[in-house]
Amino acid sequence: MSDQSLAKISTPTLVSTKAIETIRWIALFGQVLAIMIVQFGFNFDLPLTACLLVIALSAGVGFTQNYISQRNKNVSIDALFGLLVFDVVQLALLLYLTGGLINPFAIMFMAPVVISATVMSQGRTMILVSIVVALASILASYHDPLPWDEAMLDLPTLYVIGLWAALVLTTIFIATYAGMVAKQSRDLARGLAEARVTMAQEQQMVALGSLATAAAHKLGSPLNTITLIAHDLGKMDPKKDFDLIKEDLELLQSETDRCREILAELNHDAVSLGSETDDPMPIKALFTHLIEERFADIKSMITLNAETQDNSRQPEVMWRPDLLHPLETLIDNAAEFAKTKVEIQIAWDDQNLSVVIQDDGPGFQSAILSRLGEPYNSSRSGNDGHMGLGVFIAKTMIENNGGKLKLVNKKGGKGAQVTVTWPRQEIDSLGLKGNRTS
């Protein structure tokens, strides 16, 4: 994330139009209600026509804003500042017609100031505070008097000055306090955003490193074959061993193509890492796609079953390299050791998703079973380019996605069983809402 993007978190440039509209219409409704109650409930003889014209002016601005909001869901900070200035002036006009600062509703001057301090810069807020102070000072001396009853108290000038001082000081205090709290909140949001960006970058680096390690692991076997072929070719006589050389060259070309395909997969996965745009797909569909794409030559020996354990919705996941590589490795290992079949059983409930991969091969050797998942731990280490890293890489990538890997031999020594378990909130792209099916 760039510094400019992070700056937008500290100083918002847009505010929800709907929220501003709601606040302004509530304020207008309150103004109309207050005037009607005073006019007809308390029998005060207010300049009703003038007051309603001022409110109608504000309503006109509201309708204009509503028309504009049909095109834009957000209002800019500059537009919001203009609306707040207008609201302050409109309130001042109402107060001028209804007693000035003596009117108890003069306290409403603080509402636009609080909104400004919450979402706008200190400079704009200070300008708005200055406007409020100037208008309050004018209203303290110039305003239409309230139509007091003769029996009612005539407030002394000193008391009016006290009202002015209280309003001004309270407005400045509220603006300062609200501005400080809002700034701290924005700073905290910025810090959290930076932390999220850093964590995302670190996760991408870890995932990219895992993909590179997985590619290196895949390259081990063809590169070892290429090395052996090159060694054999150096010992052959081109005139006597032409047929053998031709066969080795064909194998060399095949292994070279395989290396190219592995590197192409790494490049594709690295480019798409963290920017997946595919729609999520049901977990069974993902496995079906994986088998069709990566195991087309042996798919006849692979059986796939999926079921829910509590009638919950099937998890939907993204086609992500850091999810597919470990699954591909585990299925590939099972297929390599299996005699006739590999069984994949997918099960889920409201909380977890599990994948069990079983084969009918010899199972894990007891010498390595206790250290399965550790690097350089394999019965084939050093043979055909194997380094004992496949399960370790798969385990690391699964745990990076919040999952767990368990490797055991099936009872009776009839093959190996690998179980991968994820909490649904870590892998389900649609979350947990609406899990239950009808």
Image (cartoon, rainbow, N blue to C red):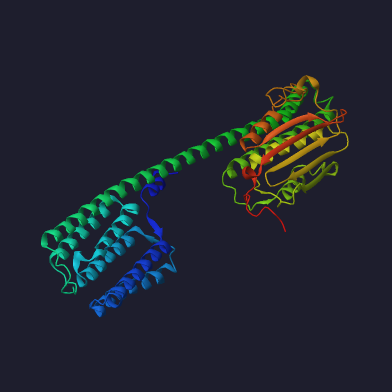
Q: Is residue 264 visible?
A: no
Of 224 and 376, nearer the camera is 376
Classify residue 171 as left or right of residue 29: left
Residue that lies at the very extreme toward the bottom in this rendered image? 49
Position above or below: 277 against 102:
above
Classify residue 53 as left or right of residue 258: left
Position above or below: 422 against 85:
above
Position above or below: 319 against 222:
below
- Quadrant of residue 265 in the image? top right
- Quadrant of residue 264 in the image? top right
Of 135 and 272, nearer the camera is 135
Name the spot of residue 183 as percent of width and height, x first. Answer: 34, 46
Residue that lies at the very extreme toward the front in this rendered image? 151
Name the spot of residue 118 as percent of width and height, x first. Answer: 34, 52
Q: What quarter of the picture does the N terminus occupy?
A: top left
- Quadrant of residue 75 in the image? bottom left
Of 336 and 86, nearer the camera is 86
Name the spot of residue 421 as percent of width and height, x first. Answer: 70, 38
Name the spot of residue 252 as percent of width and height, x first. Answer: 75, 32
Classify residue 278 as left or right of residue 181: right
Q: How many marks?
A: 0
Q: What quarter of the picture does the C terminus occupy?
A: bottom right
Q: Residue at x 57, y 47 (%)?
A: 275
Of 156 and 15, nearer the camera is 156
Q: Is residue 305 visible?
A: yes
Q: Which residue is drawn at 41% across and 61% down?
A: 19
Q: Residue at x 29, y 63 (%)?
A: 82
